[in-house]
Image (cartoon, rainbow, N blue to C red):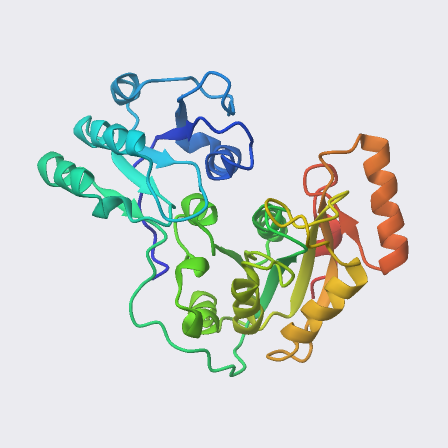
Amino acid sequence: MTDPIELRKPYLLFVGAAASPIDAKTAAGVAYWRPENCRAQLRLDENAVDLGLPDMTVKDAAAAGCATFVIGLAPVGAYLPDSWVSLCVEVLEAGMDIASGLHVRVGSVPEIAAAVASSGSRVFDVREPPPNLPCGNGRRRAGKRLLTVGTDCCVGKMFSALAIDAELRRRGVNSTFRATGQTGILIQGSGLAIDAVVSDFLSGSVEVLAPGNDADHWDVIEGQGSLYHPAYAAVSLGLLHGAQADALVLCHELGRTAIDGDYQDYPIPDLEEVIALNLQVARRTNKNAALVGLSVNSSNLGEDEALTAMAELENALSVPVVDPVRTGVAKLVDQLK
């Protein structure tokens, strides 16, 4: 289930016509955290998000040695645009593999399946959950676990978890990043796409993803969604129960006042309420779960304004507040015992 998926390197990252980094967050995440694996990008529009990689066609990328075409977008719903089908066929016929985190199983599209059969290239659908996942049992297990939770989607839960794991390992602490979304899986090379799991097995899948471990080992589990999201709260709830987390880190975008996207009628509650609800749910399976701090995305603010806002939150909530990009996460890791 969590064995490495062994993608061939280097990658050609597909950005499509995405105009926003959020729309291309999978490609952006892989480029940021694994730049050594990324050789080129393929954009369908010159105004699309630029990852700072050379622009190449499929033919040029294959000639340059690219081995895996990473579909770096995650559109809502389970569909594959027709224009992408022919592109995927071209990729496979050029000798590259495909790695996809889409809800639709790319390898099951008839034209693509035929190209796989004729070319010998492979398709990795990383959102395909393994069979025979268990229901959660809630039994205490050894080891230590940290879960990132959020006020909304796309507020930095994966980024924060990766940064915390990196800081722990930098300090010589035994730590593993546990990916629960398509981008994290493509970065880590292993994991389980929680949002593709049947709801009865959500908490059990997290118990399997982050099993009992050595007493001094930290599993840093990537959070998903938000308990306050009208569409995705179920995934967040399953993660909180299954993680049995000792430590929670709340992720939030400074200045965001409502659930992003088509949910603007749903305001984000006061952070004190968000913290209280997440702790209440987490303590159902670990009565000692504690908040160790906030990890904020302050990219929409200037430096001085961001640091002032973070200091005010620290004072109001009495916990460390960091921005992984501006300040690093050392103050959060200092709280872990």
The N terminus, quarter of image: bottom left
Residue 111 horizontal/vertical position (percent):
17, 38
When the figure is inspected, residue 4 is found, relative to residue 27, above or below; the finding is: below
> Do we see residue 40 in this rendering?
yes
Based on the displayed image, in which of its 4 quarters is residue 97 positioned?
top left
Residue 331, percent across and down?
Answer: 76, 51
Provide residue 45's location: percent of width, then percent of height: 44, 19
Residue 265 picture location, percent across and down: 68, 52
Q: Is residue 138 left or right of residue 72?
A: right
Tell which of 291 and 149 is nearer to you. Answer: 149
Q: Is residue 262 left or right of residue 45?
A: right
Q: Quadrant of the C terminus?
A: bottom right
Q: In the picture provided, is 213 more to the left or to the right than 312?
A: left
**Left or right: residue 78 compared with residue 119:** right
Image quarter for residue 22? top right
Q: Is residue 216 visible?
A: no
Q: Is residue 184 above or below residue 196?
A: above
- Residue at point 48%, 32% (across, down): 31
Q: Looking at the image, which residue is at 74% across and 54% down? A: 294
Along the viewing direction, whichever of 219 and 256 lies nearer the viewer: 256
In the displayed image of the protein, which residue is found farthest to the left?
118
The residue under the point 31% across, 63% down is 130
Q: Nearer the viewer, residue 304 or 8?
A: 304
